[in-house]
Amino acid sequence: MGQTLCADASANSDRPIGLSDFDYDTVTDLLGKGQYGLVYSAKNTRDGSRVALKVMAKAKVDSMEALMEEVEILMHINHPHIIKCFDFFSDDDNYYLTSEIMGGGELFDRIVSRHHYTEADARNLCLILINTIAYLHDADIVHRDLKPENLLMMSNDDDASVKIADFGFARRLEGGTASEKCGTPGYVAPEVIKQEPYGVCADVWSLGVIIYIILCGYPPFHHAKMGTLFKLICRGQFKFYDEEWSSVSSEAKDLIKRMLTVDTRQRITARQALNHPWLQMDEEELNKNGMKGTLAQLRRFNLKRKFRAAVHTAIVTGRLQRLVASLPSNQD
């Protein structure tokens, strides 16, 4: 076991929650990393429940305003397919955010573990994602970093338990637009690359990229050189290659085209997408479209994605060690 950090919890359940209410392991139970810090598995000593505890070093937080906006959004939205957050508190050195543990891993890992995969499976999953993004957009919230790594599974037993996570770049637009250049290359919308004012439709583009990958196993825009990749995105230059796409319905391809439309005035909205014919098609009909080739492609794509993530994790190891050293330890 790694170093365990804990403190005696007060018997007074009415007092504000704080670090002393959690008992967590700083090494073996590291769950991941977010924009500002590291996430650990923790036990709430008040009720025994397990939570994810995100630890953010104050010295590493560039914008307190951005952090508080993330917290405010997460604490006030309520949707079955968005990660649920419980508490936010701080001490002299760190901020702490607690949320539900996503014990089922990443969505793409779940897909590639399947032995049978059809267009109906893909469509039902995409319906959940589009519905969830429509909920956010109805509340004038833009996520701004939709990508496979931020689509997590609540359970190992339920293939529909997907939830959207990591709201570090999320903003409440309140009828306005955003202008910051943020997101992940390959998923970012053309208007963000061009540093034009943009709205919630930037998420629709990112989700269109994800749906493309879910249906064929590789991204619509890819190039080793970042500049060339961005040019392809800004031109909306992608293809449906016959080897993977010949067995996919024309309705699915039409929705992707509408989501990956460069002109934001012509791009379909998430709410409009819910009425698209593909999402209304008969499941039995779509079940006929097996996608064995897509699974093979998706497994290759997922391995490459995991390798890049492992390299990045190695780079931030020093940051992890410094943050762990800053946490309060037991005085046994």
Image (cartoon, rainbow, N blue to C red):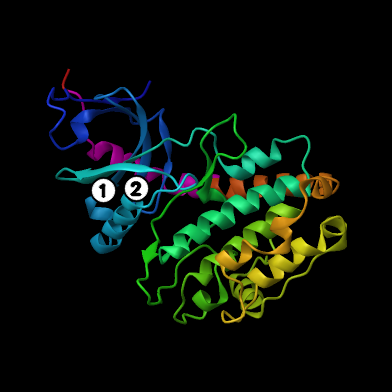
- In what element is the residue under mark 1? strand
Whichever of labels 2 and 1 marks the residue nearer the N terminus, that label is: 2
Q: Is residue 204 above or below residue 267?
A: above
Residue under numbered circle 1: 57
- In what element is the residue under mark 2? loop
Tell me the kind of residue under disc 2: Gly
Position of the N terminus by quadrant: top left
Tell me the kind of residue under disc 1: Ala
Residue depicted at 62% across the width and 80% down the height: 266
Q: Is residue 303 left or right of residue 67?
A: right
Question: Which numbered marker is on residue 327?
Answer: none
Residue depicted at 47% across the width and 82% down the height: 196
Q: Quadrant of residue 269?
A: bottom right
Picture mark count: 2
Q: Is residue 72 above or below residue 109?
A: below
Q: In this view, does 326 lie above or below 59?
A: above
For this rendering, which residue is in front, 74 or 318? 74
Q: Residue 49: in sight, yes or no?
A: yes
For mark 2, does the 10 Å Cα neighbourhood hold few (<14), some (14 to 19), or many (20 or more) residues? many
Residue under numbered circle 2: 37
For mark 1, does the 10 Å Cα neighbourhood hold few (<14), some (14 to 19), or many (20 or more) residues? many
Position of the C terminus by quadrant: top left
Q: Answer yes or no: do the residues labelled 2 and 1 have beta carbons within 8 Å?
A: yes
For this rendering, which residue is in front, 6 or 246? 246
Instruction: Find residue 295 and report its horizontal and vertical position in percent.
Output: 76, 45
Q: Is residue 316 magenta?
A: yes
For the magenta stretch, what is the residue range?
310-330
Q: Residue 143: in sight, yes or no?
A: no
